[in-house]
Image (cartoon, rainbow, N blue to C red):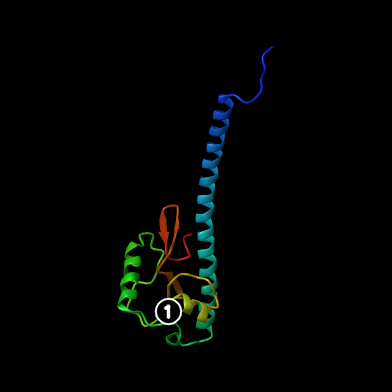
Amino acid sequence: MKNNKGITLVAVILTVIILVMLAGVIAIEIGDTYEKSSVVQFIAYMKMIQKKVDFYVEEGVNCENLGRSLTLENKSNLQNIIDLDYQNLISTSDVNSTKLRYFNSTDIYKYFDIADINDEIIVNFENREIISLTGVEKDGEKYYVENGL
């Protein structure tokens, strides 16, 4: 009588193949989940900033007292973003407007009370538009404003 102790090489190979396939599926799902969470976080903080901007405008707060004036570098970055906006999601066109204000991460916390945001934004207080200088990527496209996502 034959002794069948242990596992065969075929069983080991099949087990390894199945585990590799499962690991591949899990890795793809984790990547998609990370991208989706970045987009959701971007939309959430842009909406919170939008509410504060609306409040400031409706209360008649002088926008020149908020954030900082745009530097030449800010204007250049903004112009590049506007030029890349082939979907026409950004309505701001004049980078020299006095209604444009720059906010870094510290300013975002100070003026909008939102912590842990590693972004730089430009707010157009004339049309209440918020433009991220960092943006978020979704489906291979870069978005700098919340609308369109």
Residue 42 location (% of width, % of height): 50, 64
Query: 79 or 88: which is nearer to us?
Result: 79
In this rendering, position of residue 23 left or right of residue 85: right
Q: Quadrant of residue 92?
A: bottom left
**Residue pushed farthest top?**
1
Q: Nearer the viewer, residue 39 or 57?
A: 39
Q: Which residue is disc 1 drawn over?
A: 126
- Local secondary structure at mark 1: loop
Q: Position of residue 16 (x, y in %)?
A: 55, 33
Left or right placement of residue 84 versus residue 33 in this view: left
Residue drawn where x is 53% and y is 33% of the image: 17
- How many neighbours does mark 1 have within 10 angstroms: few (below 14), some (14-19), or many (20 or more)? few
Amino acid type, mark 1 = Glu
Residue at point 38%, 63% (across, down): 88
Q: Where residue 46 sits in the image (x, y, percent)?
A: 51, 69
Above or below for 100 versus 31: below
